[in-house]
Image (tube, grey):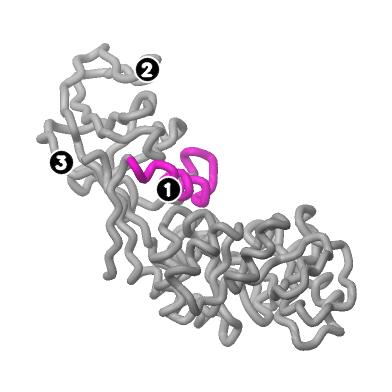
């Protein structure tokens, strides 16, 4: 076994319930783009709907159509751009689209995106909506870091949409849903929080969330480095004294990034430091005594948070989770319900 990813859809259901309580009547739309941030869009999307989410949001028409065959009754909203060829597919698949340039295609339910400060997709002002417009939205740039600017964006959105009736207004992402009550409006598009990952890089338990993903491997080889001996490319770790180390058969090809050297994992339930250079297929952990090959190594789970690894790598949990999805052919994957 190189490694095993476990997806606890029971934890996801509980996260949905926690978010719905926080939203206090606003709809929860589950964002499952990028294969549910590496967690599995079909499994997580179905669990989210079952727990009370009222729509699933993807980034592409292709992602939504992949779900449609298994979830024929689900409300599916495509947040990203679409091509002319995909427009017909969206209509046939019963999808809802987001327009960011003001063009309103006929025969497909549309959400118009207003740019209130993100500076990416979206129109600068709204025109009179047609009958196909079912929603108006914006995207908050700083709900996780600067609530003052998020409030500025929200006020711009409120002013621009004040005269509209009969459409769904939505602005909140996970961070705004948790920290900015006035942004919850008619619906909130929650992604990272669904998976029990903190949009603030903190402990998800602070917001009543449970990590959905766990990741385990094992010690494939244990050896004694004599004082002065090194391990890994570039001799970045040189043993100051005789040191037991364990080789774990995961590396950056498995989603364990090269800049995670120095992070901690669990070996036999004890925190151990990753030392030396992370290579394509292996990492090395420092041990305090000899252990047998096959000893379990927990990379994420049992108190080891993806947020911790993100801090070491100076990135965000979103990127680490999506990176695991790209390496699924090198890992086994199990879906369970706690």
Check disc 1 and report its element: helix, strand or loop.
Answer: helix
Give residue 50's mark: none
Between 270 and 84, which is closer to the camera in this rendering? 84
> Which of pointers 1 and 2 lies earlier in the amino acid sequence?
2
Give the side of residue 20 with respect to residue 278, left or right: right
Quarter placement of the N terminus: top left
C-alpha gap between disc 3 and disc 1: 25 Å
291 left or right, relative to 35: left
Residue 312 painted magenta: yes
Q: Which residue is mark 1?
A: 325
Which residue position is annotated with label 3? 295
Residue 105: image quadrant is bottom right
- Location of residue 89 in the rendering, given as x and y in whole percent from the top left corner: 62, 64
Q: Residue at x 32, y 54 (%)?
A: 214
Residue 249 makes an appearance in the image:
yes
Relative to 133, say whether 228 is above or below: above
Image: 330 above or below 152: above
Q: Residues in magenta? A: 311-329
- Front residue (pair 222, 318): 318
Q: Is residue 139 left or right of residue 74?
A: right
Total numbered labels placed on residues in the image: 3
> Helix, strand, or loop for circle 2?
helix
Q: Which mark is residue 233?
A: 2
Q: Label 1 to label 2, Cα distance in Å?
A: 26 Å
Whether pointer 3 and pointer 1 mark residues with C-beta atoms closer than 8 Å, the reply is no
Q: Sequence-wise, which precedes: disc 3 or disc 1? A: 3
Q: Is residue 179 visible?
A: no
103 relative to 92 in the view: left or right: right
């Amino acid at each position: 076994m190189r490694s095993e990813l476990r997806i606890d859809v029971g934890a996801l259901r509980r996260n949905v319930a926690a978010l719905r309580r926080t939203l206090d009547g606003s709809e929860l739309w589950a964002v499952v783009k990028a294969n549910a941030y590496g967690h599995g869009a079909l499994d997580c999307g179905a669990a989210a709907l079952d727990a009370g989410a009222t729509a699933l949001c993807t980034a592409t028409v292709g992602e939504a159509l992949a779900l449609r065959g298994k979830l024929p009754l689900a409300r599916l909203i495509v947040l990203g751009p679409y091509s002319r060829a995909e427009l017909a597919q969206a209509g046939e698949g019963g999808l809802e689209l987001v327009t960011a340039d003001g063009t309103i295609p006929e025969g497909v339910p549309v959400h118009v995106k207003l740019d209130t400060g993100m500076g990416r997709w979206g129109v600068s002002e709204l025109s009179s909506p047609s009958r196909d417009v079912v929603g108006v939205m914006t995207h908050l740039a700083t709900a996780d870091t600067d609530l003052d600017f998020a409030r500025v964006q929200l006020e711009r959105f409120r002013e621009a949409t004040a005269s509209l009736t009969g459409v769904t207004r939505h602005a909140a992402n996970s961070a705004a849903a948790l920290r900015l009550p006035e942004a919850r409006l008619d619906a909130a598009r929650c992604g990272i929080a669904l998976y029990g990952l903190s949009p603030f890089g903190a402990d998800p338990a602070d917001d009543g969330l449970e990590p959905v993903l766990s990741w385990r491997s094992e010690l494939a080889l244990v050896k004694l480095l004599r004082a002065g001996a090194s391990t890994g490319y570039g001799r970045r770790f040189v043993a100051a004294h005789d040191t037991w180390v364990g080789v774990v058969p995961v590396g950056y090809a498995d989603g364990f990034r090269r800049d995670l050297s120095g992070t901690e994992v669990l070996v036999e339930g004890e925190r151990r430091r990753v030392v030396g250079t992370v290579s394509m297929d292996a990492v090395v952990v420092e041990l305090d005594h000899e252990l047998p090959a096959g000893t379990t190594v927990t990379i994420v789970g049992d108190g080891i948070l993806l947020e911790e690894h993100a801090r070491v790598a100076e990135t965000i949990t979103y990127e680490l989770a999506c990176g695991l999805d790209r390496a699924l052919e090198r890992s086994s994957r199990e879906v369970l319900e706690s």
